[in-house]
Amino acid sequence: MNLARVSQNGQITVPIEIRRQLGLKAGDKILFQQNGNGEIVLSNASSNALVKAQNSFSGLAEKIGVKSEDDVQALVDSVRHAGKSEK
């Protein structure tokens, strides 16, 4: 169990064990969410956003025909070249 005290300004220090588990470092943002049981759950906002982005892109590679690292590189190259021709 980890305990934190709320300062007069409403600030808390996240215990080191929790910071490690969440992968938090100075400057990171913490997301507070209420679950179905009414409990408040903390998460690393950066990693939470990354997971959401990964989930939203799920299956997209197959749809656009990207099957290998070479396909990814070809896609990146085509986007780079398209940007140069617009200048």
Image (cartoon, rainbow, N blue to C red):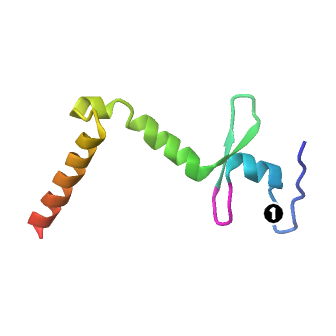
Residue 63 coordinates in the image, percent (x, y) = 25, 30
Query: At 75% from the left edge and 53% from the top edge, which residue is drawn?
Result: 19
Residue sitting at x 29%, y 36%: 68
**Depth check, front residue: 31 or 77:** 77
Residue 51 relative to residue 30: left or right: left
Q: Is residue 25 left or right of residue 2?
A: left
Residue at coordinates 27% horizontally, 32% vertically from top-left? 67
Determine which quarter of the picture holds residue 70: top left
Describe residue 51's horizontal placement relative to residue 4 as left or right: left
Secondary structure predominantly adopted by residues drawn in magenta: loop
Where residue 83 appears, x then y in whole percent?
Answer: 16, 62
Image position of 52 with respect to 31: above or below: above
Position of residue 55 relative to residue 50, above or below, is above
Residue reaching furthest to the front: 70
Say what secondary structure mark 1 lies in: loop
Task: Verify whether residue 22 appears in magenta.
Answer: no
Q: Which amino acid, by three-letter code, is at mark 1?
A: Gly
User: How far across and how far down the image is residue 2, in percent?
Assistant: 88, 47
Taking the spot 22% from the left edge, 34% from the top edge, the residue there is 64
Q: Decide: is 72 above or below 84.
A: above
**Residue 27 is covered by the magenta coloring:** yes
Residue, far left: 85
Q: Residues within 10 Å of mark 1 (few under 14, many from 20)?
A: few
Magenta range is 24-29
Residue identifier under label 1: 10
Tell me the quarter of the picture where residue 59 sits.
Answer: top left
Horizontal relation, residue 35 to residue 6: left or right: left
Return the x and y of residue 77 as percentages of the image width and height. Answer: 20, 54
Q: Point out the image quarter for the N terminus.
A: top right
* Residue closest to the eye, 7 or 19: 19
Question: Which part of the image, by quadrant, shows the C terminus?
Answer: bottom left
